[in-house]
Amino acid sequence: MGSQPFVIRDISVKMDGDFNVLSAYLDDSYIFFKAPEKFPLFLNAEWFIAIALLDAMVSGRNIEVDDRVPVSKAFLDRFGELQAIFSCWNPRLKKVELKSQVSDRDQGFDQVGSFFSAGVDSSHTLIRKHEEITHLIMLRVFDMGDDDDSWARRIERQTEFAAGLGKILIPVETNARDWTDDKGIAWGFAHGLLISSAGGNLGMKRLYVPSSHTYDHLFPWGSHPLTDPMWSTESTRVIHHGSAARRTQKTRVILDNPAVANNLQVCWNNIDRNCGNCSKCVRSMTAVYLLGTQVDSLPPLTDLGQLKLLRPMTASAASSVEDLIFLAKEVGNEKVYKMLKKQYRKYQRSLLTSMMDKSLLDGRLRRLYRRLKKPKWLELRVTLLSPERGDL
């Protein structure tokens, strides 16, 4: 273990203008979360532990938490197993100890929240758990095209949308992603810890985390049905929701709810509108097209040539294309089926090439690719799988 512990100190909640600000220092780095003043933030350490954990594990540094803010005993009891999962995914991550005061006190929260981006996964959870959910939580760390004006428009629109369904939107801003990016931690890993650990700080009795993938397509990912619930405490139960439904099945449910369908926001490039030209927009446009309808929130798919944008490069993207292939076959659209299969086969061929390189050439092609192309992920300190593995 490294000789110097990773210190989380000066955890506090203060008013700053019209905002409640929850903050702490991670070593010497100032990390904050802020929400409009009408939304209280609570003095718990778990959110900051989540941000620090991957950096601590890759550095081999035990974590020490501000003695004034005790850590949940229920969470602490699962802390070792949580790290064991992360270490299985990436053996570079080593178990560390957590030194803190401990409490098993239930804070008596009575709100039920769900993270909400207005995308397919979170919209599906909103519909399925509509009777339970009281608050929708929108975190400003996930999207491209995120300038102050776009964020203001997004919050205005989504606040009105939530109110129309009898829900309350909590917009939260943070610099946590700036910190994880600076530390070289893959966002595909870090994002899950950031959202699944938030419930206690936001005062939620239950916190729903909408799923990204189905139970038959599980692989290392930041938000995961194994790891999300481990951030539960005596006060907050964290529930990973929706892994039993494919994205196209979720889309069917959404299309049966016009208010939610017309509010979809799925774009890679913008946070307050859908461009209709990026892969995430085309993915949802294709599902809507195959299901024979239209929605106000997305342009119609009029050029099937856009399906070329769906060529998968990762397991996550491949699962989405596979889902669309199943739907195209189900509805009998032979043209879209063949076009999607063509893109999917390119991904399969890349996997075959990787397997042959690993089995027959001892990874020489992989090493040559890394040396010549210098992919950005090689600069990361923490990835979902270790770079030594042949999967990467």
Image (tube, grey):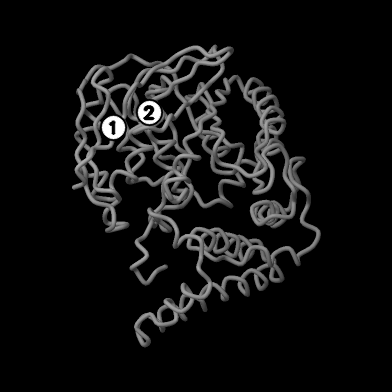
Q: In screen coordinates, is 101 left or right of 306?
A: left
* Residue depicted at 68% across the width and 22% down the height: 160
* Residue depicted at 50% across the width and 68% down the height: 374
Secondary structure at numbered mark 1:
strand
Marked residue nearer the N-terminal end (2 or 1): 1
The part of the image, by quadrant, that contains residue 11 is: top left
Q: Which residue is mark 2?
A: 25
Q: Which image quarter holds the C terminus?
A: bottom left
101 is higher (above) or lower (below) than 373: above
Q: Amino acid at mark 1?
A: Val
8 is higher (above) or lower (below) than 52: above
* Residue depicted at 69% across the width and 64% down the height: 307
- The answer to the question of whether label 2 and label 1 lie on touching residues, with beta carbons closer than 8 A, is yes
Q: Amino acid at mark 2?
A: Tyr
* Residue depicted at 52% across the width and 36% down the height: 125
10 Å neighbourhood of mark 1: few (<14), some, or many (≥20)? many
Q: In screen coordinates, is 380 left or right of 136?
A: left
Across and down, in percent, residue 257 comes to 65, 36
Across and down, in percent, residue 354 comes to 44, 78
The part of the image, by quadrant, that contains residue 361 is: bottom left
Q: Estimate the spatial distance between the alpha carbons at disc 2 and disc 1, rounded to whole Å.
A: 8 Å
